[in-house]
Amino acid sequence: MSFGRSIVLVASGVVAGIAFVLSCSDAPGKADAATCDCPAAEPPLTASRYQVVSNIGDVPANGTGGQSVRCPTGTLFLSGSCTTQLLNPVRDVTLQQSGFYEASELGVWACSFRNNEATPVNIQATVVCLKPAP
């Protein structure tokens, strides 16, 4: 490779680099997150926008049972929970399944329990939903 050819390659690289930098510098202003003055896409998530809904049911002694709960119309499902109604670490209850089962029923959370005790147990299905922005 000759010296003249090397200079031509270096010069073309420099020209391409300068052209790239100049083509990107037409922005209306510098991007700075600290001085962002654009409008918010959505209002902040405050406690008043969350809605918690629960349903309580019974599981018979030595049997199985379930409970489900639905988000109110117009809210967005965020999370679900399955527990015994009262906090009691001595209970012998097994959660068999939990979740939503169809995409069309995304706002419904279902819980299925097995009660291994000789007495009925109260269970609770809960959803956390998000209300739309006011």
Image (cartoon, rainbow, N blue to C red):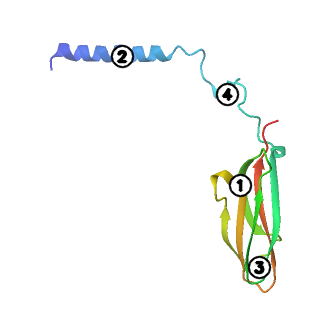
Q: Secondary structure at mark 3?
A: loop
Q: Which residue is denoted by mark 3 in the rendering?
A: 91
Select label 1 or label 2 by which is in front: 1
Q: Residue at x 76, y 37 (%)?
A: 44
Q: Which residue is denoted by mark 1 in the rendering?
A: 79
Tags 3 and 4 in contact by the CB under 8 Å rule? no
Sequence-wise first label, 1 or 2: 2
Label 4 Cα crowd, 10 Å radius (few <14 / some 14-19 / many 20+): few
Q: Which residue is denoted by mark 2 in the rendering?
A: 16
Residue 68 drawn above or below residue 78:
below
The x and y percentages for residue 81 are 73, 62
Q: Secondary structure at mark 1?
A: strand
Residue type highlighted by circle 4: Ala
Residue type highlighted by circle 1: Ser
Structural distance between the alpha carbons of marks 1 and 3: 24 Å
Q: Which residue is denoted by mark 4 in the rendering?
A: 34
Tags 3 and 2 in contact by the CB under 8 Å rule? no
